[in-house]
Image (spheres, helix red, strand yellow):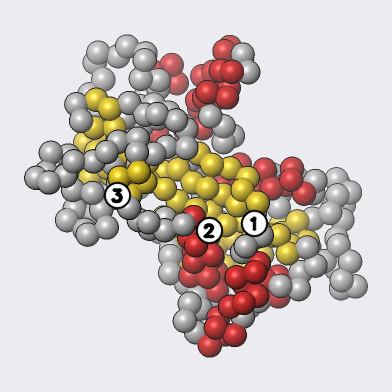
Amino acid sequence: MVLSLKCFKDAGHYSSLYYLIRMIHFKSRTKFYPRTNEEIVRLHVPDDKVKWDVTWTEYAPPSYTSDNIRNQTWADPPIGAEGFNPKWNEIDGNVNRESHQGMYKILNGVPLNIVGRTGLCGRGLLGRWGPNHAADPIVTRWKRNTSNNRELHSVSQKHVLQFVGIQRRDTREWALPGGMVDPGEQVTTTLKREFMEEALNSLGSRSAIQSEKMIDEFFAGGKVIFKGYVDDHRNTDNAWIETVASNFHDEQGTCVGVLPFCAGDDAVNVRWMDVDRNLSLYASHIDLIHRVAELHNCHW
């Protein structure tokens, strides 16, 4: 479930707080950190020790920052590096260091994960200290039968919605075709770019140029369904992913719904997938799909 702790507490459901923490901060505490051949192991963080305001004097997690992001021009330098004076909780030049969840804490010059402990400090695989902003385009259409009528699910008797899913190259999990927001880039630009790179693999190609106007118009009509923290395996105590997820719906299936797909960039496969509660998707993506299902009142 993709929700904020603040909204939850405002609702007054204190008795289920630890259940909520587990739901939105579970993959962020996975034992083995991704892409490390199980060499980097998180310190186990029980549900009742996640929140930073819970005293845990013995808490001493290992630290890890991948060599693949050290000294990269698109990544932050180490804390304390000469000339690196980040403005936390602000727009820092072209870099957005604000969180969609609110103000995050700073301890000894380092930002603390806005949801809580993960069992690992450092940046892991992430380029930015603090929030790393992403964008997830959820492109949908109605599933249609051979007569071009919207298809009903045999059990729920609701129309079946489909979305564009990509199979990630790194984990082979199915996911939304999202990615990171470049410094100074508008989220709307990121949403379109990531979809074209990962699902169409056609930026700059003749087919992309021919359909550019249609795609521009389609991606101008999105509806934001979520802004906030993402429960991602890559999160650490000091770096985490937040996203803006927007739904772009092709009601008649005659726009993006008929474009030929071609996996590209970080994807190995791409296809239309039926919206269903039993899907197994990367990170918190199933929760985003659930929100879209509620928006369209379709089969779930």
In the rendered structure, are the residues bearing label 1 and label 2 in contact, judged by CB atoms less than 8 Å apart? yes
Residue 167 visible here: no
Q: Is residue 96 visible?
A: yes
- Compared to residue 255, the image places residue 191 above or below, namely above
Left or right: 182, with 287 as reference point: left
Of helix, strand and loop, which one carries label 3?
loop
Of mark 3 and mark 1, the one earlier in the sequence is: 3
Q: CA distance from mark 1 to mark 2?
A: 9 Å
- Which residue is more in the foreground, 240 or 32? 240
Q: CA distance from mark 3 to mark 2?
A: 19 Å
Residue 159: percent from left, percent from top: 84, 54
**Residue type, label 3:** Gly
| Mark 3 or 2, closer to the camera | 3
Marks 3/1: CA distance? 27 Å
The residue under label 1 is: 222
Vertical side of 272 occupied by 131: above or below: above
Quarter of the figure with the N terminus = top right
Residue type, label 1: Gly
- The residue to which callout 2 is attached is 188
Q: Which mark is residue 93?
A: 3
- Tags 3 and 2 touching, CB below 8 Å: no
SS for tag 1?
loop
Q: Residue type at mark 2? A: Thr
- For the C terminus, the quadrant is top right
Residue count near mark 1 (Cα–Cα under 10 Å), binned few <14, some 14–19, many ≥20: some
Q: Nearer the viewer, residue 171 or 215?
A: 215
* Residue drawn at (24%, 32%) of the image: 110
N-terminal of the two: label 3 or label 2?
3
Write the residue at 40% across / 33% down. 29
For label 2, the SS is helix
